[in-house]
Image: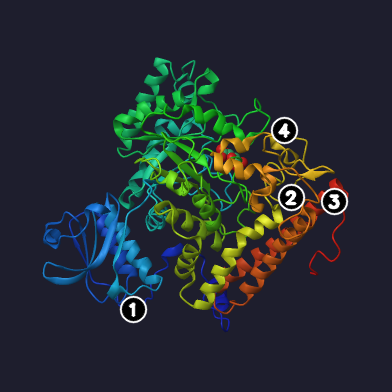
Amino acid sequence: CLLAGSVLAIGALPGTALANDGYDLWLAPADKGAAAAEVTVIGDSQTLQLAAAELRRDLTAAPLPVVLARADAPELAALGLPTAMLGAEGYLVCAATVAGRPSLLVTGNSDTGVLYGAFAAIRAQKTGGDLAKLDLTSTPKVRLRVLNHWDNLDGSVERGYAGQSLWDWWTLPDFKDPRYTDYARANAALGINGTVLNNVNASPDTLSAAYIAKAAALADVLRPWGIKVYLSARFSAPIELGGLKTADPLDPQVQAWWKAKSDEIYRAIPDFGGFLVKANSEGQPGPRDYHRTHAEGANMLAAAVAPHGGVVMWRAFVYAETDPDDRAKQAYSEFKPLDGKFADNVLVQVKNGAIDFQPREPFHPLFGAMPKTPMMLELQITKEYLGFATHLAYLGPLFEEVLEADTRAKGKGSTVAKVVDGALEGHDLTGMAGVANIGRDRDWSGSTFNQANWYAFGRLAWDPTLSAEALAREWARQTFGDDPRVVDTAVSMMMESREAVVDYTGPFGLAHLMDTGHHYGPGPWVNDLARPEWNPIYYHKADRSGIGFDRTRTGSNAVAQYAPPVARMLADPRTTPETELLWFHHLAWDWKMKSGRTLWQEMVVRYDRGVATVAHMQRQWDGVKDKVDAERWSKTATYLAIQHNEARWWRDASLVYWMSVNGLSLPEGSLAPE
Ligand code: GCW
């Protein structure tokens, strides 16, 4: 009683909205006072019923009764709707006369398509669309829109900053936590249609009978929402689980083991999506242990799931000590020669950049370089290198930047988005993966604004050409309501946030300067780890004469991995985008930047600008204190204060370190007074 009273008291402070723990994500219920829509379902499926329930709950003041029906319903036959072009998962929402009654029709070629249409209608209304004029049609551009959970069987989450794993393996398969349904709803609202339940650093036990049953229980919850379950497979599982002496992919016994294991999984999960594999990377076992190629490894698993319609998502995130010259080159060196050698149901999953989810990285040279292979883009939604859950960094612009990058593989306009959605090379099997930022925290993602990164990933996986800013606005309206002052403020903060992190952690393409292991806070000086490419100094190569990694012909020549026009542009520091300058070049501290300042002076400006931007975000947030509920407002304000302190920590520690290397001092008056 006392507790409830005190919560109410907080909510009742003058001018302060009630508390909100962020649990509802972008699905906050519509205005309770408004009339619910009248919804009729034609057909009979659980998914259609779920879609109807969403509309009854969240669509208000509909000018017409709503009808939900699959396109093949006899009642729609006479309408001649252009549904063929919607494909398996697209939707159409429009005014139509159904069975003699003017209606708002939500349709698609599958139940899931109708469900997506229902969510699209709700989104349209919540973001200001006029239901009377609603005419929506959309088809996903990417087929597999998948979250990758790096969740371990002990409940911990690798690089997870939102609490323990959502999956309670202990109580599964009997207890299906209602939260799994809420997770499914949130994903379906974005069009996410797959989830890899466990960490790519996979335990062999994931494939044991006990865990297959647990995964099957989750699959049962997710299925009506159009979401398939996938598992990360440990390549050596035939040894650890099967008692075999080898995991050699060309060994008939190993092949038979995987076939039998796949059959067992499909008996429990008939629509199982397939396997995700991290092989021969960071100590994980793989086909290279047996002198086989990645293609031989992937194809062996692909053969096991192919009869059931499954796929293999084979990661290209590989690097080893054997090629210490430049870690950024290794994936391309190993995978490019394998183009055309992968089975039809294999996708190669490539991180956005060639190193590892840095605040800024040039696009991965494998995009556009393997035209015969479906290339799946892997993005990191969880902010391993961008300040975990505490720092506000909206990743929409980062995702957009890689999707818009022009590989020039087939002339101008050969964007990464077109490689990923299959348009450039004519692939039908396409995919995008996001490393989830979801945990058991009440707000799912560790902070309100982190939810936007999950949101942006899901929407971009549906349509990689959507704009990061438009998505920020969409998200903000559904999250905070439609007060323009709050929405504009949130969008403005979001759109400047990622560049702020780049500025205060390392501008101009500097990368991997975080303290090692946990990757939180600065550590550009670290140089005592066993493998050279784990040490930050390997990446910045700063000395008295200059800073940056020479990836041109005089250095590692990684630029040669890009298509010739891109390679030429990157070979010269004067034509390299300044945002990526030190990624590709080792330059003198007094290199002249476009601003006219020296590199060193400009670096100081950028570090300081990063701190100033965080201060600006704080001021903006202060300005909407009376407009946002107390709980979300104060948590965000506190996190911004942490971020401001830590941006200063980053700036000061980095500058002091660079000065210890270059012997220069701070340009007069360069740091803004605090
Ligand atoms: O980003 C690095 C992380 C590892 C991760 C690895 C990978 C799952 O530091 O924690 O392991 O990449 O992507 O495989």
Q: Nearer the viewer, mark 1 or mark 4?
A: 4
Residue 38 drawn above or below residue 176: below
Residues at discs 4 and 2 in contact (Cβ within 8 Å): no
Of pointers 3 and 1, the one earlier in the residue sequence = 1
For image coordinates 63% across by 53% down, the residue present is 386
User: To which residue does mark 4 refer?
Assistant: 532
Residue neighbourhood size for the residue with mark 1, other residues' Cα within 10 Å, grouped as few (<14), some (14–19), many (≥20): few
Asked if residue 525 is positioned above or below residue 400 in the image, the reply reads above
* Residue 236 drawn above or below residue 391: above
Q: 414 or 132, which is in the foreground? A: 414
Q: Residues within 10 Å of mark 2 (few under 14, many from 20)?
A: many
Mark 4 and mark 3 residues within 8 Å of each other at the beta carbon: no
How far, Cα to Cα, is label 1 from label 4? 62 Å
For mark 3, does the 10 Å Cα neighbourhood hold few (<14), some (14 to 19), or many (20 or more) residues? some
Amino acid residing under circle 4: Pro
**Left or right of residue 192: residue 55:** left
Q: Which mark is residue 34?
A: 1
Distance in Å between CA atoms under marks 1 and 2: 51 Å
> Counting residues from the N terminus, which is met first, the one under dot 4 or under dot 2?
2
Measured as percent of width and height from the top left, residue 529 is found at 74, 34
Of the image marks 1 and 2, the number of the one nearer the N terminus: 1
Of discs 4 and 3, which sits in the foreground?
A: 3
